[in-house]
Image (cartoon, rainbow, N blue to C red):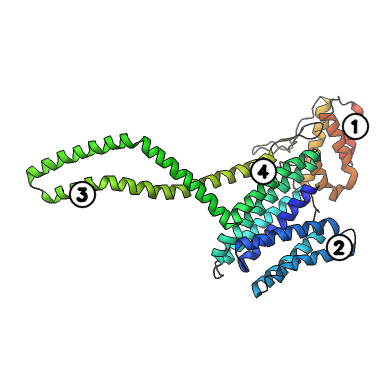
Amino acid sequence: MTGIILLEIISVVSFIYSLLTIFFPFASISEIFIIFIWSITVSAIFAYTYRRSKTYQIIALLLLAPLIFYNNMESIYFVVIAAFLIHAYITKSFMKGSYSEYVDKLKKTYIVYGVTCILILTINEGYYNFINISIPFAIIYLMTTIILVRSIRHISTGMDMQKINQVNLRYIVMISVTSFIVTLDKLRNAIFLIIKGIYLFLIEIIMKILYYPITIMITILNKVMEYIRGKMMEGGNDVLEQLLEESTNESSRTLKKNAVRWGNTLVQKVIGILLIITTIYIIYKLIIKVGERSYKGLEYTEEREYIKEPRKKKKRFSREKYPRELNEQIRYYYRRYLEKLDKKKIQILKSDTSLDINEKAEEIFEDKIEGIRKIYIDSRYGNKDADKNIVEEMESLYKNL
């Protein structure tokens, strides 16, 4: 669980920092990032120890340590508010909640960011602070939270904890590298210069390769211009002749200037495109893959059971036919169970497993539903043929809800 704890700590601290830096930008992003690392370290130690004894509550005071070095009004507001929120979260909400609750938290933060973007317009230099200081922490928050939700999802489906920790370790390393790149100005500029140098080197090689073809094209263009000039001289059009001559002389210089200008702008575009592609890829891997129809990690691969939506033109009193096969009868009663949950206004997502569904249904039916899930799982994934007694038991459990 160490990886999960660290992911949740990074998630909550980066979220708090992404908001507070908009209103209290008391230092450069590089200096704030150092304080950010300190806050994560102290928060992780506090999260591990505060339940053991009340004396460990003192550790939370270390979150105020940055005030030794930064003591202006903005830094005081920032550090005190951040410390209070981190302490409150760890003591009240840390490592509490199911997969669906963590997903709801993530969705609510989108609303918070939306409202914040509106408030930015009313704050002096709010837009500048958001772009240059807050966005890096927002990126860290979104990456970390998506990975956290993904990990909790895998835990709920029974995936091996060691495998989850190995995957999370790779993601934490990726987040750390991304954090250093987006928050340390010198490192970010150095990487930009390296990429720009590589690009200009490649442009120089390409220009040398294309030198002769371009020279031939310019020669042909000059010949065409001379031919047109000769025709114009016959007509006595000196003004157009002068313009054509200037155009011919400027063609080579324009080509060189454009190559440099295009080079500078293209480097920025290439970096932007790479960032967009990387973001889309991460979202695909971490969000879309979570919603796939099957999850491996148990002794079986569980597939979803769906409530059949009624057709628009449906006959009155029509109902799904009762199947003949005993195993299908088990699934039949399980679908009736899902319909009953739907009538009770229990929200069932397409990505929910039978375990997720039972966790939601426990609020209404308590522990009466565990037998339904057990029979369903044994029948569908246990490689056993159901008998009439099991079907009758399933029917009885369903009807007694």
**Relative to 199, 317 lies left or right:** right
Q: Name the residue nearer the viewer: 207 or 29.
A: 207
Q: Where is residue 15 in the image (x, y as percent from the top left)?
A: 68, 58
Please, what is the three-letter code of the amino acid marked with disc 2? Tyr
- Give the CA distance from mark 1 to mark 2: 55 Å
Residue at numbered disc 2: 56
Say whether marks 2 and 3 touch (CB < 8 Å). no
Camera-near label (3 vs 1) is 3
Q: Name the residue nearer the viewer: 69 or 9.
A: 69
Say whether marks 3 and 1 touch (CB < 8 Å). no
Q: Where is residue 382 in the image (x, y as percent from the top left)?
A: 85, 28
- Whichever of labels 3 and 1 marks the residue nearer the N terminus, that label is 3
Q: Residue 16 got which mark? A: none
Residue at numbered disc 4: 286
Please, what is the three-letter code of the amino acid marked with disc 3? Glu
- Give the CA distance from mark 3 to mark 1: 96 Å
Q: What element carries label 4?
A: helix
Say whether marks 1 and 2 touch (CB < 8 Å). no
Camera-near label (1 vs 2) is 2
**Relative to 76, 197 lies left or right:** left
- Give the CA distance from mark 2 to mark 3: 80 Å
Q: Position of residue 263 (x, y in %)?
A: 41, 47
Residue at numbered disc 1: 392
- Whichever of labels 3 and 4 marks the residue nearer the N terminus, that label is 3
Residue 162 in sight from this viewpoint:
yes
- Give the CA distance from mark 4 to mark 2: 36 Å
Residue at numbered disc 3: 246
* Residue drawn at (60%, 64%) of the image: 28
Q: What element carries label 2?
A: helix
- Give the CA distance from mark 1 to mark 4: 42 Å
Local packing at callout 3 (Cα closer than 10 Å; few below 14, some 14-19, many 20+) is few
**Relative to 121, 206 lies left or right:** left
